[in-house]
């Protein structure tokens, strides 16, 4: 406790010496009891747009601010890109220990993570068929470290380990498991803590509303912004945001915040799978952003699509590696099911002449008009997706009641519980989809039966009201 609070105090003192201004209305709080590390809390009432703290750009841990950028050519950083460049700089500053300007900052940053990158095989197995398993990117990161980062460290060993006679040897040792793990830790810190820092003079094209093009955003330099990254997030209680000014960054309240309330940044509308992957935690209120993916391989296992249709769908940008089902409330197929999946299925089921007619006109079936045959096919796909998970939704819910989310207990139990919550969310979405499709099929079946009854008897069987409803 003493070390923890001591590190917080030393960090805040360093930040103020670095030119930061921190409102007396906020404080850094120990939230470990709530499994949330440190967080920022209001000590007095705060009004909308009040500045909570101001961080000078010079205090940001970034490529631009690190001495390394004056010693290694800019072209090397350009070649590495924003992500690996910041990892390189962080490794350099971290390796410099107390000599680094950011040493007090490193001492409040975590060294252990719950992000999926650090889960063991048995923990990852608990994610079962969740698509997030294929998005962890550990191998890709290892490859980037080995093929891009290590050669740079080797080339500039005398700068990276300046003043050390063993510089070359130490550069070689960066291949060791311990150092590779350190690189992953820096990468994980960036993933969960770094900001895309808008430059003081915008270099990017912005549209009329001031938003950068997506690719431009991706190219923004990454930076670790002390204190701004001590804010936790909550899907429903976001009350602060970082504003980029020429010489500094301002964290401002977005609404009135009462004394005692926690101050939350916005990490985005992330499904729990991404929250776990990037931030290593998941809370129920992110269920509203849950997503389950239907891989294309599964779609084409259930549905045979001829080459001509596949080529046409591809040309129309309907073919994808997978299709999403997203949460909606109340749940509707129109809002939740990927329109591209419906178009894909409906096009595949079209009679030849109808397909040729649409193709001639450069058109596609309308996703809002899913047919019962289309619904039956999508239902088969959804059922096959459900079957990919090792346990059923019922079994998971049962396990949840028997082993509720643990409090302050072992990491493994916590990870198992978070994985279970995640797969419950995905299975729940799949079930909602299956139920809604079954309803469409049943409704269409009934209306066909009714139509047959009308055709057979030459008269309307149902009452007028019913007929109106159908219309
Ligand atoms: C940007 S940091 C926030 C500061 C962090 N709590 C700390 O002590 O360094 C992001 C990390 O905080 C934690 N976190 C953020 N919001 C949280 C929440 N609502 N509940 C639990 N942990 C949270 C997660 O571990 C996440 O990876």
Image (cartoon, rainbow, N blue to C red):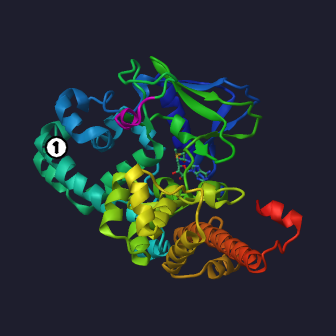
- Residue at the spot 42% in from the left edge and 31% down from the top edge: 197
Q: Residues within 10 Å of mark 1 (few under 14, many from 20)?
A: some
> As drawn, is 44 to the left or to the right of 163?
right
| Front residue of 299 and 152 | 299
The outermost residue toward the front is 458
**Magenta-colored stretch includes residue 218:** yes
Give the main secondary structure of the magenta stretch: helix
Q: Is residue 10 visible?
A: no
Please state the horizontal and vertical placement of residue 235, each as a whole percent of the image: 64, 48
Please state the horizontal and vertical placement of residue 148, each as a whole percent of the image: 19, 48
Q: Which residues are magenta?
A: 212-219
Relative height, residue 48 to residue 305 (above, below):
above
Q: Is residue 244 visible?
A: yes
- Residue at the spot 49% in from the left edge and 21% down from the top edge: 208
Please state the horizontal and vertical placement of residue 407, each as a whole percent of the image: 66, 66
Q: Which residue is mark 1?
A: 152
Relative height, residue 186 to residue 387 (above, below):
above
> As drawn, is 144 to the left or to the right of 376?
left
Q: Quadrant of the C terminus?
A: bottom right
> As drawn, is 360 to the left or to the right of 22?
left
| Front residue of 24 and 387 | 387
**Secondary structure category for the residue under label 1:** helix
**Magenta-colored stretch includes residue 381:** no
Q: Is mark 1 within 8 Å of ligand 1?
A: no
Please state the horizontal and vertical placement of residue 346, each as a whole percent of the image: 49, 65
């Amino acid at each position: 406790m003493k070390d923890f609070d001591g590190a917080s105090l030393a960090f805040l003192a360093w930040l103020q010496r670095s030119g930061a201004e921190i409102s007396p209305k906020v404080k850094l709080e120990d939230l470990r009891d709530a499994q949330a590390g440190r967080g920022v809390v209001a000590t007095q009432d705060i009004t909308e747009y009040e500045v909570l703290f101001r961080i000078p750009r010079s205090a940001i841990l970034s490529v631009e601010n690190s001495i390394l950028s004056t010693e290694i050519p800019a072209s090397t950083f350009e070649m590495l890109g924003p992500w690996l460049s910041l990892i390189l700089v962080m490794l350099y500053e971290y390796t410099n220990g107390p000599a680094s300007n950011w040493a007090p900052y490193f001492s409040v940053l975590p060294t252990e993570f719950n992000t999926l990158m650090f889960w063991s095989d048995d923990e990852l197995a608990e994610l079962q068929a969740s698509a997030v398993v294929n998005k962890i990117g550990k191998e890709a990161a290892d490859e980037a470290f080995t093929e891009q980062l290590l050669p740079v460290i080797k080339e500039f060993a005398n700068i990276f380990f300046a003043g050390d006679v063993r510089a070359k040897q130490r550069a070689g040792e960066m291949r060791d498991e311990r150092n590779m793990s350190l690189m992953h830790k820096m990468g994980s810190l960036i993933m969960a803590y770094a900001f895309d820092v808008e430059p003081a003079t915008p270099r990017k094209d912005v549209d009329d509303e001031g938003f950068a093009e997506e690719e431009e955003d991706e190219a923004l330099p990454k930076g670790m912004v002390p204190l701004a990254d001590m804010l936790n997030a909550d899907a429903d209680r976001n009350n602060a945001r970082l504003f980029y000014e020429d010489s500094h960054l301002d964290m401002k309240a977005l609404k009135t915040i009462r004394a005692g309330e926690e101050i939350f940044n916005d990490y985005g509308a992330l499904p729990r799978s991404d929250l776990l992957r990037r931030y290593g935690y998941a809370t129920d209120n992110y269920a509203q952003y849950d997503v389950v993916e239907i891989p294309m391989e599964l779609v084409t296992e259930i549905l045979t699509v001829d080459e001509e249709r596949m080529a046409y769908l591809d040309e129309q940008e309907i073919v994808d590696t997978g299709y999403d089902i997203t949460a909606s409330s109340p749940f509707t197929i129109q809002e939740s099911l990927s329109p591209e999946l419906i178009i894909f299925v409906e096009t595949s089921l079209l009679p030849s002449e109808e397909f040729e007619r649409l193709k001639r006109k450069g058109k596609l079936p309308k996703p809002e008009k899913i047919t019962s045959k289309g619904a039956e096919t999508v239902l088969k796909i959804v059922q096959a997706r459900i079957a990919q998970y090792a346990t059923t939704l019922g079994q998971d819910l049962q396990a949840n009641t028997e082993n509720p989310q643990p409090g302050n207990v072992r990491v493994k139990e916590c990870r198992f519980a978070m994985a279970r919550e995640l797969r419950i969310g995905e299975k729940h979405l799949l079930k909602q989809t299956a139920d809604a499709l079954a309803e469409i099929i049943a409704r269409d079946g009934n209306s066909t039966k009714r139509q047959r009854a009308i055709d057979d008897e030459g008269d309307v069987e149902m009452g007028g009201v019913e007929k109106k409803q159908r219309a």
